[in-house]
């Protein structure tokens, strides 16, 4: 049954990732992969926020599997980030590759911490 929660959460997360990527790319009208960075930051924030909730409240493991493993696993795009970075390197666009590495890693760490802090502040 745990597999079911991960699979359903992942389906919702992947679908939302696809829709979010399309909308962000359209709205920002850019070829730089900022949509992937934005999606990863949102996912990082949400995982930080939710992980604290799961620590404070006694919430059934199925919801952690659904939201953290499934939904956010499907929503965030680390594999896409990796592919886009490698494509920049292979195309000789070292500058964009390094910007992507820096922004994706630093911002997502900051967003996880921000999610944790906001969740903690809201509950304390």
Image: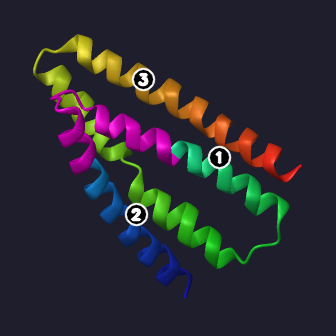
At mark 2, the secondary structure is helix
Magenta region includes residue 51: no
Segment tinted magenta in the rendering: 22-43
Say which label, 2 or 3, has the lower sequence index. Answer: 2
Question: Could you classify mark 1 by the number of other residues whose Cα lies within 10 Å: few (under 14), some (14-19), or many (20 or more)?
Answer: many
Name the quadrant containing residue 68: bottom right
For the N terminus, give its image quadrant.
bottom right
> Which residue corresponds to the image point at 82% horizontal and 72% vertical from the top-left?
58
Q: Nearer the viewer, residue 91 or 67?
A: 67
What residue is shown with label 3?
A: 103
**Magenta stretch holds residue 32:** yes
Residue labelled with disc 1: 48
Judged from the image, the secondary structure of the residue bearing numbered disc 1 is helix
Q: Residue at x 34, y 17 (%)?
A: 99
Compute the Cα span from label 1 to label 2: 16 Å
Task: Say whether marks 3 and 1 touch (CB < 8 Å).
Answer: no
> In the figure, 104 relative to 120: above or below?
above
Describe the colour scheme in one phrase: rainbow
Q: Compared to 97, does 66 lie above or below?
A: below
Q: Residue furthest bottom?
A: 1
| Local SS, label 3 | helix
Q: Residues within 10 Å of mark 2 (few under 14, many from 20)?
A: many
Q: CA distance from mark 3 to mark 1?
A: 18 Å
Q: Which residue is mark 2?
A: 13
Circle 3 Cα neighbour tier, 10 Å, few/some/many (<14 / 14–19 / ≥20): some
Marks 1 and 2 close (CB-CB < 8 Å): no
From this viewpoint, which residue is outermost toward the right?
124
Most extreme residue toward the left is 91
Residue 11 is left or right of residue 28, and the answer is right
Q: Position of residue 32 (x, y in %)?
A: 21, 27
């Amino acid at each position: 049954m745990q597999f079911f929660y991960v699979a359903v959460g992942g389906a919702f997360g992947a679908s939302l990732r696809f829709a979010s990527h399309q909308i962000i790319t359209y709205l920002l009208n850019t070829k730089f992969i900022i949509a992937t960075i934005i999606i990863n930051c949102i996912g990082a924030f949400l995982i930080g926020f939710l992980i604290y909730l799961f620590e404070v409240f006694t919430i059934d493991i199925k919801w952690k599997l659904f939201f953290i493993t499934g939904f956010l696993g499907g929503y965030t795009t680390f594999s896409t980030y990796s592919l886009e970075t490698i494509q920049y390197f292979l195309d000789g666009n070292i500058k964009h590759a390094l910007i992507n590495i820096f922004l994706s890693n630093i911002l997502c760490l900051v967003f996880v911490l921000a999610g944790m802090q906001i969740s903690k502040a809201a509950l304390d």
